[in-house]
Amino acid sequence: MQRVFILKSYMQKPGLVDSHIHFTDFPQGINIPTLVTEASTVGVSHFVCNGTCEEDWLKVRALSDTYPQIVPCFGLHPWFVERASVDWLLVLESLIRENSNACVGEAGLDRLTEQLDRSAQEAAFEAQLRLAVVYDRPIMVHCVRAWGWMIDILRRQPRLPRVILFHAFAGSADIIKPLAGMGAYFSFSATVLNDNFKKVRLALPAVPRDRLLIETDAPNMIPSAEHRRYYINSTDGIDYNHPANLAAVLSGISNLLNEPESELRERLWRNSKEFLGTLLR
């Protein structure tokens, strides 16, 4: 398969890493190469692309094979645990084993949707934690209204993954310290730029600077009009977030933390390299 390298106009600056994105969730009419190219022009050098269910995994691998900027993640999201095949874990382990550049995830816990089976979520999450440990890979974690439950599960593990990323972090400031002590990183999306998300706003400055990351979660979590710089023209009338909006997330967080954007960019680049290690090609 041909590998596609995108020329970056911001090579003189540290790259921006979109630590959580779902290229497979864009509708068919959206051109992924165009999104990658446009994001690269504002300095986005890498994309951590998450698969959430069995139908995603081979698509994510194909994207990673084509674009060396894309770090693949294979995981079973709590929303899809109950519809997974009986062999999902065997298939997932095979993908992790065969793809040395892959992370585990998106995995996790979700109590927003009450009808989800809690015991099934927990079993699937613990299985994926074990995979991350066995193959020494980062794990990408979704946690919604389940922080106490999450911490209890992590504390009872005989061994934790070397690196855990809580994506689109929406927890309170007081849980950051115990989670950081377990090897956690915390990624923030454009939601932190919204004045209404006060809890997230308060949590942001509590994150140790060496554990801070940013993301778009595209095509989801569209920035408000004030912060959105890039738009996607879709034929279905639905708005989608553009990965190039990561630059707006950087700028907005720089303002919230009252830190020079250039210094924050450098810090985020170092954090991304520490987080992803050799997976950052």
Image (cartoon, helix red, strand yellow):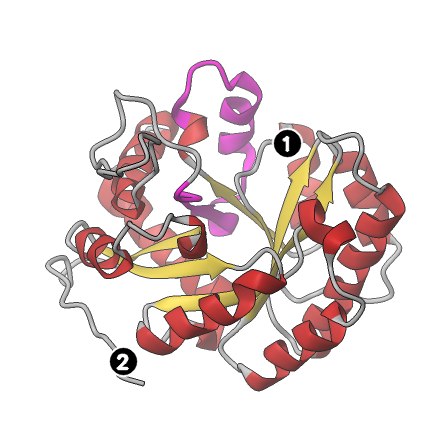
Q: Secondary structure at mark 2?
A: loop
Which region shows up in magenta? 193-219
- Tell me the tag on residue 3: 2
Q: Is residue 146 left or right of residue 53?
A: right
The C terminus appears in which quarter of the rendering? bottom left
- Tell me the tag on residue 241: none
The one of 78 and 45 positioned closer to us in this rendering: 78
Query: Which residue in the protein does label 1 denote?
Result: 171
State yes or no: residue 42 in magenta.
Answer: no
What amino acid does circle 2 point to? Answer: Arg
Tell me residue 224's x, y (percent). Answer: 33, 23
Image quarter of residue 182: bottom right
The N terminus appears in which quarter of the rendering? bottom left
Q: Can residue 181 be seen?
A: no
Residue at 21% in and 74% down: 5
Q: Residues within 10 Å of mark 1 (few under 14, many from 20)?
A: many
Farthest residue in the left direction? 9
Residue at 23% in and 52% down: 39
Farthest residue in the top direction? 196
Tell me residue 102's x, y (percent). Answer: 53, 73
Q: Is residue 258 left or right of residue 146?
A: left
Q: Secondary structure at mark 1?
A: loop
Tell me residue 111's x, y (percent). Answer: 75, 33
In the depicted structure, whether residue 249 falls above or below residue 164: above
